[in-house]
Image: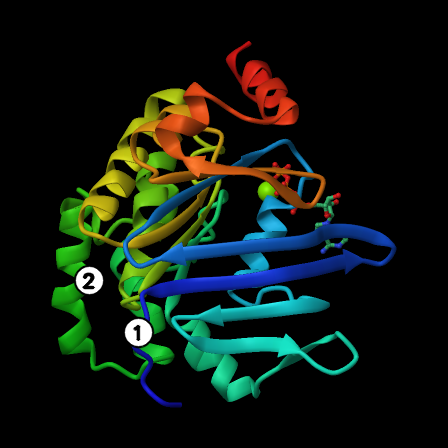
Amino acid sequence: MPAMTTDLMIDARNIHKSFGGLKVLQGVDLQVGRSEVVAIIGSSGSGKSTLLRCLNNLETIDAGSLAIEGAYLCQNNAQGKSQYVTERQIKAICARMGMVFQQFNLFPHMTVLQNVIEAPLTVKKVKRETIEPVAQALLAKVGLESKQNYYPSQLSGGQKQRVAIARALAMQPQIMLFDEPTSALDPELTGEVLKTMQQLAEDKMTMVVVTHEMGFAREVADRVLFMDKGVIVESAEARRFFESPQHDRTRAFLSSMLK
Ligand SMILES: Nc1ncnc2c1ncn2[C@@H]1O[C@H](COP(=O)(O)OP(=O)(O)OP(=O)(O)O)[C@@H](O)[C@H]1O
Ligand SMILES: [Mg+2]
């Protein structure tokens, strides 16, 4: 694959995705620039998780095109159906993205350190002596250097989620996708995770964050998107999004969030 020089990190065009007869994404466009932080908000079932999952190939799309840092994952063929590149190319492209889920998904039988080094060891074949100090530095960065020998069951939800972030970062992604990373946490634990994400944004990571945290969307995101029924209804610079939403559906959603 040729090296690409583009600052367009994610370029999704007119993507469509159905599950059986249910149209979940109905012509979504998403462009994300290098170091940009985009927050996606919207009601339950609007297709937010599906969109993120399509971006890193946890789901395939039916129609439209997806490019990551200039490399196409898929493009429409003559019949208007998405045609994917080879499995090998897909793997290489998706390795540029890390994802953090609502439910942490840590390996319960592995220590914190083992969780963080597992994918670099097995997927990237990095040597243990090379990755261990990197993992320890990442754990320090998320404030968990003293927990490296703990098991996930011995951690709080917020700590688990910070391990999940360190684990994703250990693969050295160019882009981080977050799917409601704080929704499973008690309110007093969301702050530490959001702070870690804010630091990541300050380090110029490109981020797409599905969230219900309006404070985070307003303060940390550059741009906010509102999704409803499989389409992006509104997309605006964060401050403008909250100060003067243009669409009735956005206004209705924002007022429902404030209740
Ligand atoms: N694997 C699947 N098979 C069938 N239907 C699915 C699948 N994944 C999602 N859906 C459906 O697609 C729709 C959109 O789901 P999605 O998870 O993308 O919504 P969401 O915006 O993330 O919602 P939430 O805020 O509740 O997480 C829902 O109606 C859901 O039931
Ligand atoms: Mg979801």
Task: Please state the horizontal and vertical placement of residue 65, each as a whole percent of the image.
Answer: 60, 70
Residue at screen point 62% across, 53% down:
28
Total marks shown come to: 2
Is disc 2 placed on a helix, strand or loop?
helix
Nearer-the-camera pick, 241 or 57? 241
Q: Quadrant of ligand 2?
A: top right
Disc marking residue 135: 2
Disc marking residue 120: 1
The amino acid on which the numbered mark 1 sits, given as a three-letter code, is Pro
Neighbor class of circle 2 (other Cα within 10 Å; few <14, some 14-19, many 20+) is many
Residue at screen point 57% across, 58% down:
53
Residue at screen point 40% across, 27% down:
240
Task: Please state the horizontal and vertical placement of residue 129, each as a whole percent of the image.
Answer: 14, 77
Task: Please state the horizontal and vertical placement of residue 58, each as a whole percent of the image.
Answer: 58, 64
The disc, 1 or 2, on the residue closer to the chain's N-terminal end is 1
Q: Quadrant of the N terminus?
A: bottom left
Res 115 seen here: no
The amino acid on which the numbered mark 2 sits, given as a three-letter code, is Ala
Marks 1 and 2 in Cβ contact (< 8 Å): yes
